[in-house]
Image: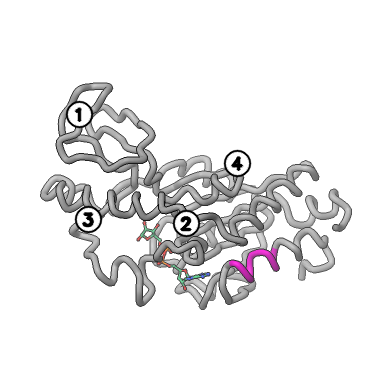
Amino acid sequence: MADAHQVRSSWGPIVVLTGAGISRESGLHTFRDADGIWATVRIEDVATPEAFARDPVTVQAFYNARRRGLLDPAVVPNAAHRALVALERAMRQAGGDVLVVTQNIDDLHERAGQTRLLHMHGELLKAICADCGNVTECRADIAVEAPCLACGAIGRLRPQVVWFGEMPLHMEEIAAALARCATFVAIGTSGNVYPASGFVELAHQAGARTIELNLEPSVTRSLFHEAHHGPATTVVPAFVARVLDGPRNRP
Ligand code: APR
């Protein structure tokens, strides 16, 4: 491992954006791959506030099934999740910072030990009342007629997930981190969904080095300085090893 100061000063602060691809090898489907979620389910039927108002039975059933899938004991963090934790710890020891911004609603980053983490699209293991905004932990199915324990409203509990047409979470903190990052890394995301797909341009404006780590070129590949394509469990540990090896690897 190179001199801690060198690592921090030449790579940090680092902002990492993750998408569904980082959890694919943990057994969770992505959205837009051939076997992706949107290949069998329509966004308009399950992932908009209008769908929830129109057909809460279908929406709750969709997220209840995904929550049960996430809680399957076979679904655990993989080497890519673990490598990002090692990067966070090494940079912290060096007095530097790594912030992971995830589009994922799973809890695999937390389970791996990531602490500097923002869920911009919400969390599947939380529920929110659409009336009073009360947020609770949620590891069981949400019943369509479930009462909110805070305000008593019936049938207003929903997964704490950001649906299409809704504002993502933590956008001010994310914009501030992008404005001062020296390295921006996008992992396992196709680049199809805004505002996450625009983060690379904000990082460029900050003068950051931008790196794509993905199974295949994303739709925003041309916006990155460099890209390494392959399974996340291969390309992410390789990237982290390169960072911890110090500045000599930074072009
Ligand atoms: N390792 C690395 N990348 C992978 C792997 C893997 N094992 N498997 C798939 N990928 C890549 C795919 O090539 C694809 O580019 O992950 C990407 C997944 O893209 P999407 O399915 O579009 O998922 P994501 O970019 O996270 O979607 C963004 O869209 O549907 C909404 O709210 C949802 O947060 C989600 C957002």
The residue drawn where x is 46% and y is 44% is: 171
Asked whether the beta carbons under mark 2 and mark 4 sit within 8 Å of each other, the answer is: no
Q: Quadrant of the C terminus?
A: bottom right
Q: Quadrant of residue 197?
A: bottom left
**Residue at image mark 2:** 75
Give the distance between the C-alpha atoms of the residues marked 2 and 4, in whole angstroms: 20 Å
The vertical placement of 153 against 247, above or below, is above
Closest to the observer, 166 or 162: 162
**Residue at image mark 4:** 115
Q: For numbered disc 2, what is the local secondary structure?
A: loop
The residue drawn where x is 56% and y is 72% is: 231
User: From which residue to which does the magenta span run?
Assistant: 233-239
Q: Amino acid at mark 3?
A: Val
Q: Quadrant of the N terminus?
A: bottom right
Q: Earlier in the sequence, mark 2 or mark 3?
A: 3
**Residue at image mark 1:** 147
On whether residue 88 falls in the magenta region, the answer is no
Q: For numbered disc 1, what is the local secondary structure?
A: loop
Count of picture labels: 4
Give the distance between the C-alpha atoms of the residues marked 2 and 3, in whole angstroms: 23 Å
Please state the horizontal and vertical placement of residue 66, each as a whole percent of the image.
33, 54
Give the distance between the C-alpha atoms of the residues marked 1 and 3, in whole angstroms: 21 Å
Q: Earlier in the sequence, mark 2 or mark 4?
A: 2
**Residue at image mark 3:** 46
Give the distance between the C-alpha atoms of the residues marked 4 and 1, in whole angstroms: 32 Å
Determine the residue located farthest toward the front in the rendered image.
73
Q: Which mark is residue 103?
A: none
Q: For numbered disc 4, what is the local secondary structure?
A: loop
The residue drawn where x is 30% and y is 30% is: 133
